[in-house]
């Protein structure tokens, strides 16, 4: 069976469902079958996304997108500066 890529929101929603089911007394194996993932995946998700809320996940994604944009901007500026330095030195 192929891998399914789930968004951070979907993962957090499934983790919340799992927490509710575990509090009700279900085992981890039962919960994993209920949310449709393997136990290994559940534990990995819990380790990576366990303490994050849905609004925090959205904010994190927005910040990561902004960070990527700024990194591209800095790289472009560094390239422009490098080209201008070479031009001034006469090494063109």
Image: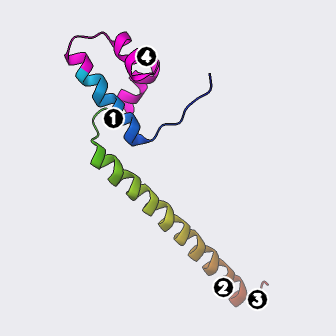
Q: Looking at the magenta stretch, what is its main secondary structure?
A: helix
Badge 3 vs badge 4, beta-carbon distance below 8 Å: no
Query: Can you tell which of label 3 and label 4 is closer to the viewer?
Result: 4
Q: What SS does tag 1 mark?
A: helix
Q: Picture quarter containing residue 23?
A: top left
Query: Residue at point 59% right, 73% down?
Result: 76
Rendered location of residue 73, percent (x, y):
53, 71
Query: Can you tell which of label 4 and label 1 is closer to the viewer?
Result: 1
Q: Is residue 23 left or right of residue 52?
A: left
Q: What SS does tag 4 mark?
A: helix
Q: From the viewer's perspective, is residue 61 above or below residue 31?
A: below
Task: Check disc 2: other Cα within 10 Å, few if <14, some if 14-19, many if 20+.
Answer: few
Tag shown at residue 39: 4
Q: Is residue 87 left or right of residue 49?
A: right
Query: Residue at point 33% right, 35% down?
Result: 13
The residue pinned by badge 1 equals 13
Q: Sequence order check: which comes first, mark 4 or mark 2?
A: 4
Rendered location of residue 15, percent (x, y):
33, 29
Query: Can you tell which of label 2 and label 1 is closer to the viewer?
Result: 1
Q: Sequence order check: which comes first, mark 3 or mark 4?
A: 4
Tag shown at residue 90: 3
Query: Residue at point 43% right, 63% down?
Result: 66
Residue 3 covered by magenta stretch: no
Q: Which residues are magenta?
A: 21-49
In front here: 46 or 25?
25
Q: CA distance from mark 3 to mark 2?
A: 10 Å
Rendered location of residue 6, percent (x, y):
48, 37
Q: From the viewer's perspective, is residue 28 above or below residue 10?
A: above
The residue pinned by badge 2 equals 84
What is the basis of the colouring in this image? rainbow
In front here: 14 or 53?
14
């Amino acid at each position: 069976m192929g891998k399914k890529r789930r968004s951070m929101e979907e993962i957090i929603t499934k983790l919340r469902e799992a927490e509710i089911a575990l509090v009700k007394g279900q085992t981890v194996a039962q919960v994993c079958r209920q949310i449709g993932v393997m136990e290994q995946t559940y534990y990995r998700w819990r380790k990576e996304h366990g303490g994050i809320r849905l609004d925090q996940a959205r904010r994190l994604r927005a910040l990561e997108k902004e960070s990527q944009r700024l990194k591209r901007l800095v790289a472009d500026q560094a390239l422009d500066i490098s080209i201008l330095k070479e031009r001034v030195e006469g090494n063109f």
